[in-house]
Image (spheres, grey):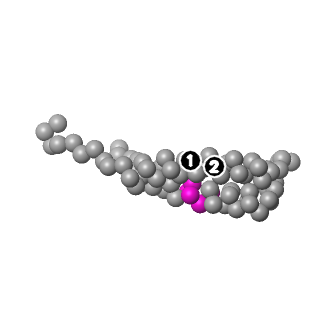
Amino acid sequence: MLKRICWRDICKFLAVAFFVSTGVLFYLYLADVSVPLLGTTFIETPDVSGVRAIVHAAMFVVFFYLGFCRKRNVRSADE
């Protein structure tokens, strides 16, 4: 019943997701578009989109490293 979670694949997925969200948020910042938040009366300003784009870009770099660049530790069969 127990299955090992492949964290490397999860990090790859998150890297791609953060890359896409960075692009969308940066576009909203450059286009100076305010976005209403669904179900509320709040509006996300372009400045907030710019800050979120920076945070998502940093998360993209972290998960890109963990998913694609970092070498896996291979243990020997003796251990």
Q: Is residue 48 magenta?
A: no
Image coords of residue 18 (percent x, y): 57, 54
Quadrant of the rendered structure where residue 75 is?
A: top left
* Marking on residue 54: 2
Q: What amino acid is labelled 1 in the image? A: Ala
Residue appearing at x 59%, y 60% in the figure: 20
Disc 2 residue type (three-letter):
Ile
* Residue under the point 83% across and 47% down: 42
* Quadrant, the C terminus: top left
Few, some or many residues within 10 Å of mark 1 (<14, 14–19, 20+): some
**Pointer 1 and pointer 2: residues touching (CB < 8 Å)?**
yes
Q: Residue at x 49, y 47 (%)?
A: 62
SS at circle 2: helix
The CA span between labels 1 and 2 is: 6 Å
Q: Which residue lies under the disc numbered 1?
A: 58
Q: Which residues are magenta?
A: 17-21
Q: In the rendering, at what x and y percent does residue 7 appear?
A: 40, 48
Looking at the image, residue 21 sits to the left or right of residue 1; the answer is: right
